[in-house]
Image (spheres, helix red, strand yellow):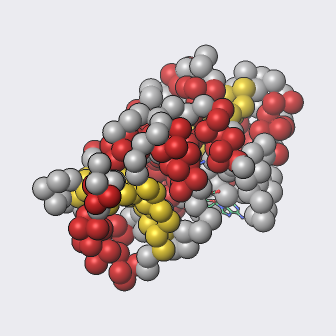
Amino acid sequence: MTLASIPLAGVIGDPVAHSKSPVLHGHWLKTYGLAGHYVPLEVKADDLGDVLKAMPKMGFVGCNVTIPHKEHVMQFVDQVTDRATLIGAVNTLIFRPDGSILGDNTDGYGFIENLRQNAPDWDPKGGPAVVLGAGGAARAIVSSLLDAGAPEILLTNRTRARSENLRDDFGARVKVAEWVQAGNLIEEAHTLVNTTSLGMAGKPDLRVPLDGLKSGTLVTDLVYNPLRTDLLEAAAAKGCVTVDGLGMLLHQAVPGFERWFGHRPVVDLATRRAVLA
Ligand code: NAP
């Protein structure tokens, strides 16, 4: 393989220095002995179009897109997958040989794969899913839970209008409740997901009462810093099945890596260790 044909990929964001993706993809490239590089690219919103035009000419085969560009980037993409269209955001770009750009969103896929891997007995069809939060990440979670067969999504967010927008987009299986009702909703939960940033290092605590949480409920948190959030600790103490949010980050990267570097990576303990190191 000549130097010029070594595939390049990366992550576009602003800021981007915090991203764990370069370590993750670097770990897989090394593990599988593949030629390729994955680099962080700090790009301002005004430069996004120019950068995306130039990247394929420089040997890039695709990239991830992170905050704040996930929605804005859609205008520069030639084709958007159905799931990304539904979510209204793109996190994975594929630069095709014909010069066109395909945009996908793998967040919902990563979310479900993480649960399937770490809670293999969990059945999304088994009862209502309670989703806390209605921000950017929540759209992918709601979409993927519906797709996986959750009979009902009970959605609550501090800003009610954002939950209502999601219900309008995703339909009547999504039911909206007031944020102050979150503790009551939890009594209904077969699955409980925190998609807010509450509980993350440096952010306020998630102060939702968990008294009604039933043992056996699947509880997961998108926050992965800390890895074991107060929500997960409290849920585990009540006999719930808990899954941390790091696995979602790892699994969402799988489809992009496979497309760019030609090998489907496995998310295993070594992958987690590499990213946590
Ligand atoms: P976002 O679009 O900014 O949404 C933030 C959410 O948190 C909104 O629902 C917001 O409610 C809520 N929130 C923030 N402060 C609050 C407060 N003081 N009280 C009540 N609610 C509050 O962010 P996002 O992109 O959806 O990300 C959310 C979290 O998920 C972040 O911690 C992010 O790191 C994590 N995440 C993890 C993964 C993963 O792979 N594990 C992937 C994506 C995101 P309002 O609408 O009322 O503001």
> Is residue 125 rendered to the left or right of residue 234?
left
Q: Position of residue 253 (x, y in %)?
A: 47, 45
Q: Quadrant of residue 185?
A: top right
Query: Does the rendering let one see residue 240?
Result: yes
- Between residue 132 and residue 59, name the one nearer to us: 59
> Is residue 27 rendered to the left or right of residue 197?
left
Which residue: 33% across, 54% down? 6
For residue 14, above or below residue 210: below
For residue 226, above or below residue 28: below
State which image quarter holds ligand 1.
Answer: bottom right
> Is residue 274 rendered to the left or right of residue 210?
left
Query: Does the rendering let one see residue 133?
Result: no
Point out the residue furthest to the right here: 237
Q: Quadrant of residue 131?
A: top right
Point out the residue furthest to the bottom here: 46
Which residue: 46% across, 57% down? 38
- Between residue 256 and residue 226, name the one nearer to us: 256
Point out the residue furthest to the front here: 2
Q: Position of residue 273 (x, y in %)?
A: 69, 41
Point out the residue furthest to the left here: 98
Q: Position of residue 82 (x, y in %)?
A: 28, 45
Which residue: 47% across, 36% down? 32
Which residue: 67% across, 58% down? 197
For residue 225, above or below residue 148: below
- Between residue 177 and residue 144, name the one nearer to us: 144
Q: Position of residue 71 (x, y in %)?
A: 39, 64
